[in-house]
Amino acid sequence: MGVEQKLGNMGIATLKLEEVINWSRTNAMWPMLFGLACCAIEMMAAQASNYDLSRFGMELMRASPRQADLMIVAGRVSRKMAPVLRRLYDQMPDPKWVIAMGDCASCGGVFNNYAIVQGVDEVVPVDVYVAGCPPRPEALIHGIITLHEKVKGEKVKDWA
Amino acid sequence: MFQQTEVTLDELRHLVSDRALTGETVLLNMGPQHPSTHGVLRLLLELDGETVINCIPDIGFLHTGIEKNMEAKTYEKAAVMTDRLDYLNTIGNNLVYCLAIEKLAGLDVPPRAEAIRVILTELQRISSHLVWLGTHALDMAAMSTFLYCFREREMILDIMEMCSGQRMMTTYFRPGGLWRDIPVGFETAVRQFIRMFPARIDQYEALLTKNPIFLDRTKHIGVISADEAIRWGLTGPSLRGSGPDYDIRKVTPYSGYEQYEFEVPTATGGDVYARYFVRMEEMRQSLRIIQQALDKLPFGPVRSNNRKYAPPPRAELGVSMEAVIHHFKLWTEGFSLPKGAVYMPVESPRGELGVYLESDGGPKPQRVHYRTPSFVHLQALPLLSKGHLVADLVAIIGSVDIVLGDADR
């Protein structure tokens, strides 16, 4: 199916190497299994039957940061958690991306207080912010697709 | 700004056995990022081979300062914060907070609002147990149960969304009743759910209850006797798995629970399997309660008529100056509670969820404290896990059903 039917018997497609690399990166983007709070439940719902994240090549959540290339920060990050989060990010191999899922991870949300880091971008660089408290699974999927679009426009040299 | 401090073995000396200092036993760090700790829980394990000798929970990775934040908000606005404590039992957190305010203020709640509160709280209990069952089974490598559980959970979330516009953080219960009446189609949706769900529970049970792998992983694991469970302050299914039939819905009924017929399921094993059995039965009992509440759902208002606490209906604002004043006062200053303190417990899916509310007579709470079951259950974790294998620890954590948002607050 797919390419064979489109191309007939040609068996060869000419593409830019960069496009192939980016395409393969978007279609096998393994997120790290890293839930913090409420948003983690919606992240689980996004993986489960009704929303089925595996449609986007993301059915594998890796518990180990060494095998992951996408960090979904799902929930509020406390000051005690922030160094742990940074260490996990540092342990991920390049190329890596970060989605700040939910208001708390994006900007602190309703918790403007002593305990919560006001946006996870204080600790790690964020590629996509997903709004909502918590965001619906559809919103998370939209965030992931937005990230895919971003990745498709990247240069290979960016990560070299 | 965010420095991680290194802890030396000397500082841990009082927590671990002497054998750790000689290197005879191994200290292993589990979490805070671990797939089966059900949140950001860190456990420091002292291991002899694969056997857990000592387990030291380290909490606070999700400390949010919710209780402190609530002190800076008016009573009604602070209700928004309560959702985010125990994020699997959001509506239950609203309920206990509203009940505490109503108890302190002597505020009446219309019978229709009480019945709807019961229906939604029981639905939430089922949805919380579904997440527990899914993740608990997933921890023991039963992937399909997780997918089935979340399929049914979506139906409950759809009902929540229908009522409040939000799937999880509903803030649907307000002091004195509900935010608004249930929409058209609510009853049909709930009836459809309770008609369909008993067969689904049977389906989960067919997957797990007599599954030899599941039995091996859960029988005689994490045993706690009734006596010890009481002394460690366990409540809810974790206590009832050991025998006592203590359920706050029966002992001190609230929201009209005394009108409904239901049983409090118990088991005698006190192990992981017994707690599994109790929760499965609880889902069936919740369905019974929902059925009864739906059948005799009274008509009438869903919010108290006391204008000092509940806003006037929209229609009155155009014709009554008094209503406008009340509305303005409520949304700017907020209502004040009489000076005093109150403690209100309810039965959450995890156990006794209580709120201690202290008022200094002003429009903002002086102190709100949540007595959360997860926090109390965590302290029993070392006792439950001692002598078991590391792999069993995962089953034990799942069986006490902790939510770290609930424990750390």
Image: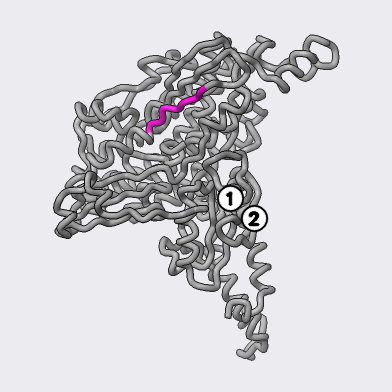
- The spot of residue B157 in percent (x, y) is 56, 39
Q: Are marks 2 and 1 in contact (CB under 8 Å)?
A: yes
Q: Is residue A57 left or right of residue B284?
A: right
Q: Nearer the viewer, residue B238 or B48?
A: B48
**What is the C-alpha distance between the residues marked 2 and 1?**
8 Å
Q: Residues within 10 Å of mark 2 (few under 14, many from 20)?
A: many
Vertical arrangement, residue B273 with respect to residue B142, above or below: above
Kindly identify which residue carries mark 1: A105
Q: What secondary structure do most residues of the magenta stretch adopt? A: strand
- The spot of residue B407 in percent (x, y) is 41, 37
Q: Nearer the viewer, residue B104 or B303?
A: B104
- N-term mark: 2 or 1: 1
- Mark 2: amino acid: Tyr
Chain letter of the residue beneath label 1 in the structure image: A
Q: Which residues are magenta?
A: B367-373
Q: Secondary structure at mark 2?
A: strand
Kindly identify which residue carries mark 2: A129
Q: Secondary structure at mark 1?
A: helix
Chain letter of the residue beneath label 2 in the structure image: A
Q: Is residue B286 left or right of residue B156?
A: left
Q: Is residue B349 left or right of residue A55?
A: left
